Image (cartoon, rainbow, N blue to C red):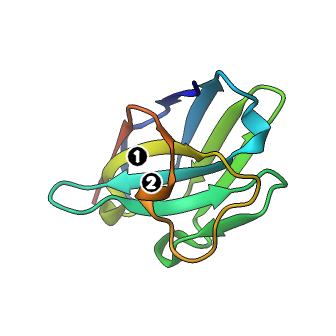
Amino acid sequence: QLQLVESGGGSVQAGGSLRLSCAASGYTYSWYCMGWFRQAPVKEREGVARIDSVGNTSYVDSVKGRFTISKDNAKNILYLQMNSLKPEDTAMYYCAAERRYFCSGGPMRAGEFDYWGQGTQVTVSS
């Protein structure tokens, strides 16, 4: 069983930065498609970024150029560097893992991911 624990959320002003971390334990970490999702109140969970076993990445259009997903396989940690934050980035952010070597194509779908963390809150004020 893979366990995921997020950290790094907080409150920042617009234009600021945060770095989220997701510590993984359990099965071999490198053989997963790893992703970050977010969910704002009364909105559906949205895929933000994902990275596959060889480091290929993809992002939702709204965060391209501002967010960077990365991972440290030696430490089993997934990161999300968030720069130029906007109030609309305010949400609960979740780390997720899918047991596949390459991430699937197309939009990120929450139902495709097998393991989830408990979430970390990000609040961006204007």
> Which amino acid, mark 1?
Tyr
Position of residue 67 relative to residue 64, above or below, is above
Figure quadrant of the C terminus: bottom left
Q: Return the x and y of residue 91 as percentages of the image width and height.
A: 31, 51
Residue 3 appears left or right of 55: left
Residue 93 appears left or right of 55: left
Q: Which residue is mark 1?
A: 93
In this orientation, which residue lies closer to the viewer: 59 or 15? 59
In this orientation, which residue lies closer to the viewer: 90 or 111? 111
Residue at (52% x, 50% y) in the render: 17
The mark found on residue 75 in the picture is: none
> Mark 2, residues whose alpha carbon is within 10 Å: few (<14), some, or many (≥20)?
many
Figure quadrant of the N terminus: top right
Query: Is any part of residue 103 visible from this angle?
Result: yes
Residue at (64% x, 22% y) in the render: 25
Residue at (63% x, 42% y) in the render: 79
Query: Dot 1 lies on which element?
Result: strand
Q: Return the x and y of residue 100 as percentages of the image width and height.
A: 69, 51
Q: CA distance from mark 1 to mark 2?
A: 6 Å
In this orientation, which residue lies closer to the viewer: 48 or 27? 27
Q: Which residue is mark 2?
A: 37
In the picture, residue 90 is in which quadrant? bottom left
